[in-house]
Every structure is written in structure tokens, then in C-alpha cells.
Amino acid sequence: MSTLLSPAAVKVVSSVASKKRLMRDLCEIAAACYGIATDEALDALQDRESIGPTGVGNGVALPHARIAGLDRVVGVFLRLERALPFESVDRQPVDLVFALFAPEDSGVRHLKALALVARAMRDTKIQAKLRANEDPAILHTILMGSEASQAA
């Protein structure tokens, strides 16, 4: 997890008006933290979302996309203060969003990263800790600790 998520890529967002705006926010943070082109990332996320929504239930979304020119899998985590409709599998709005951006040819690395993040984000104890904190540094620490708790 530590190789996926820069501390600067963890944010608390007070208000997002739409799913489209949320996707743009994710891409702008990815651009600032990892040098990914915002519009290219947004197009890739929207293309992936058109296949099927990435809202996995329980207020969690895991949008992900492959991006040309990336050299490793990277992530952005947002905790939304107000849940947002996201066309999730359980039809519930989301407030925890972990986006992954992977190299175009990442293959198994992308799938392993997605599985790692999905395991952590499905953990109801981790969800509760994330929802109970508003400090991005604490949220980052919780996410970094999630890998250790998943291994135990």
C-alpha cells in the first residue's frame, strides 16, 4: 500500500456536486501528485466506468483506469463529508473513494493492487476508522496500517 499512495494524495472533500466532478477531482489530485495528465486520466476513468460502475457497496467506490506513460500503479483516496450517489451495486451513495491509476501494460500488477485496495476497503473496521477521522495524515496512516491488518 505504501508504494501506491502518496500522503499528498489523501484528501477530505467537504462537498462534491456530482460523480463527474468527483472523477475530475480524483484526476486533478493524481496530476498534482504523480504527474498524470488530468484529461487523459479522466477519459480513462470514464471509459472504465461506462463498462460498469465501480461503486462496490457499503459506501465505497474503487474507480480505476490504465494510463499510458505511467511507470507504476498509484492511488488517490478521498473521504467525502457528504455521501454522493454513485450507481453502486447496493444503490447506496459513496463517501470513501480509492482510485487507482495503472500503467497501460501493468497486467497482474494492476490486478494485485486492486485486490489489495479492495480487501482493505471492504473491511468494516477500516471503513469505520476512515469515517471517524477528518485529518488526511491520519487517514493515510489508517490506510497504510490496513495492509498489516489484512496480513494478520
Image: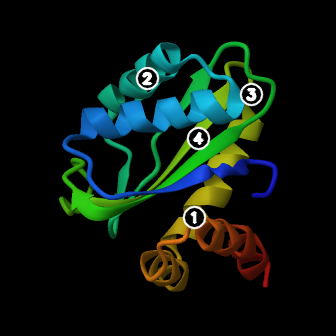
Q: What residue did someone put label 1 on? A: 136
Q: Quickly name the residue at label 3.
A: 106
Residue 73's spot in the image, x, y percent? 72, 37
Residue at the disc numbered 2 = 42
**Which badge, 3 or 2, comes first in the chain's sequence?**
2
Residue at mark 2 to residue at mark 1: CA–CA distance? 23 Å
Q: Which residue is mark 4?
A: 100
* 2 or 1: tag closer to the N-terminus: 2
Distance, label 3 to label 1, CA atoms, is: 28 Å
Q: Nearer the viewer, mark 3 or mark 2?
A: 2
- Report x, y in % for residue 106: 74, 28
Mark 3 or mark 4, whichever is nearer to me: 4
User: Observer-nearest residue: 144 or 82?
Assistant: 82
The span from disc 1 to disc 4 (Cα, nearest Å) is 18 Å
- Residue type, label 4: Leu
Q: Is residue 131 above or below residue 61?
A: below
Q: Amino acid at mark 1?
A: Pro
Tell me the residue at 47%/21% (across/down): 44
Q: Helix, strand, or loop for circle 4?
A: strand
Proximity of marks 3 and 1: CB atoms separated by less than 8 Å: no
Residue shown at 52% from the left, 82% from the top: 129
- N-terminal label among 1 and 4: 4
Asked if 2 appears above or below 150 in the picture, the reply is above
* Amino acid at circle 3: Ser
Numbered label attached to residue 90: none
For the residues bearing labels 3 and 4, Cβ distance under 8 angstroms: no
